[in-house]
Image (cartoon, rainbow, N blue to C red):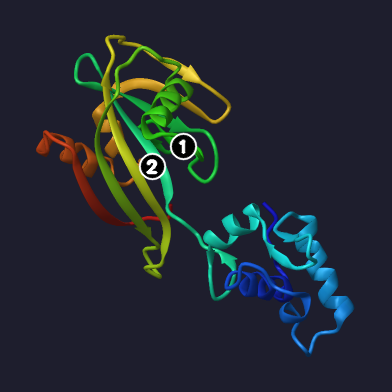
Amino acid sequence: MYIPEHIIQRNILKSLSKEEICRFRDLKPKDIESNLFLYHLRQLIKHKIVEKTVTGRYSLSVVGRQYVDRSNLPTMKPRLQPKQLTILIIEAPDDKLIILKRLHVPYLGYRGLPSGKIHYGEGISEAATRELLEKTGLDDIKLTLRGNVLMRFCDPKTKEVISHINAYIHTGKTEITELDFKTEYFVSYIANKTELFQKKSFEGHKEIMECLTKHKSYFFKEFTFESLY
């Protein structure tokens, strides 16, 4: 989606967010030259954020309404949202788990549970089934939604939130004892749970595992960690 960067374009969006339809003279501030204002208005029309009606007035398009809905209203800048993830806990024989090792920055070399972003428009179960296939190559495991975890990761020095994750926890079991599923970006394998708690492992896995043990029904928990990711 086109991101309006110029202040004139953002002010146009701000005005149109308060009215269903606006005339040109009501949109244009008196202190801005007409040709300059018209240029920026046409940029918004070009990118299908603003529409010109048959009566010669202006309104937000469907795309424009979506942009406004996802933006900070005073600034009309897109608002950063928590990442929506699926996290898979797949148990294997001998008290082992499927573990995923990242082969890309910023998580190069990090190990954790198979996980991935929920795609726009996907259902929770649909996303979990897709991530299972993409991250393990397996498609014959019954998945159960067990809980929801909200995790904030703060810079150890500044305490600023640098990552914010809303994760849906799914569990399942497999009878296979070996797995070597590799792509350009990760490798999945079966190993002891202790690998989740060694150096270069993601924060939060220990807490999620404890929640599964403690809560037999659906659970929701919030956690805050000090971490660079």
Q: Which residue is mark 1?
A: 109
- Residue toward you, 35 or 206: 35
Q: Name above or below for residue 64 compared with residue 202.
A: below
Q: Which residue is at the far right?
A: 35
Q: Earlier in the sequence, mark 1 or mark 2?
A: 1
- Residue toward you, 152 or 46: 46
Please identify the quarter of the rendering in which residue 110 is found.
Answer: top left
Q: Residues within 10 Å of mark 1 (few under 14, many from 20)?
A: some
Which type of secondary structure does the marked residue at label 1 adopt?
A: loop
Q: Which residue is at the far front?
A: 55
Q: Name above or below for residue 219 compared with residue 92.
A: below
Callout 1, which amino acid?
Gly
- Residue toward you, 70 or 227: 70
Distance (Cα) linking label 1 and label 2: 7 Å
Which type of secondary structure does the marked residue at label 2 adopt?
A: loop
- How far across and how far down the image is residue 220, in percent? 21, 46
Q: Residue at x 20, y 15 (%)?
A: 94
User: CB atoms at circles 1 and 2 under 8 Å apart?
Assistant: yes
Callout 2, which amino acid?
Lys
Q: Residues within 10 Å of mark 2 (few under 14, many from 20)?
A: some
Q: Is residue 27 left or right of residue 39?
A: left
Q: Is residue 13 left or right of residue 109?
A: right
Q: Name above or below for residue 148 compared with residue 68.
A: above
- How far across and how far down the image is residue 41, in percent? 78, 68
